[in-house]
Image (spheres, rainbow, N blue to C red):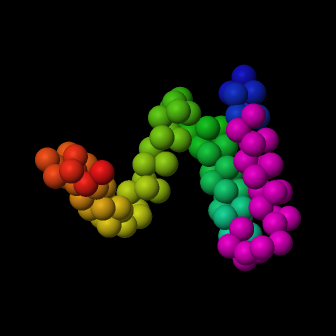
Amino acid sequence: MKILRFIPIVLAISAVFFVAANERTEHGKFFEISKNIEIFTNLYKELNTYYVDDLDPSKLMRTGVDAMLNSLDLTQTTFRNRILKAIATSPKADTMA
């Protein structure tokens, strides 16, 4: 029963893998992405199959996505968003238009 829940996920990730593998531009980058997606899929499947406790697939995936985003240096983007918000909410913003 658990396997049936993950068949659509595996099919979707496999489709991404094959599309990325056939991509002619930036072949090396897409190959690396597809290889890592394949590794991630296999790890996800193995955890679900052999882990002692039951896993919540949504929570596990969300934790993985959050960890990937936290590994990036988003300080510049966060800083830029704060500046844009400050400009948009400042009293002078009305006169700039």
Q: Main secondary structure of the magenta part?
A: helix
Q: Is residue 14 visible?
A: yes
First to last magenta residue range: 8-30
Q: Residue furthest right?
A: 22
Location of residue 27 with respect to 51 vertically, above or below: below
Q: Is residue 82 visible?
A: no
Percent across and percent down for residue 53 are 51, 32
Residue 71 in the magenta stretch? The answer is no
Percent across and percent down for residue 77 are 35, 61
Percent across and percent down for residue 34 are 72, 62
Query: Residue at image x 75%, y 34%?
Result: 8
Q: How many marks?
A: 0
Q: Nearer the viewer, residue 57 or 70?
A: 70
Q: Residue furthest top?
A: 1
Query: Residue at image x 69%, y 51%?
Result: 42
Percent across and percent down for residue 43 are 63, 51
Q: Nearer the viewer, residue 96 or 2?
A: 96
Q: In screen coordinates, is 51 left or right of 39?
A: left
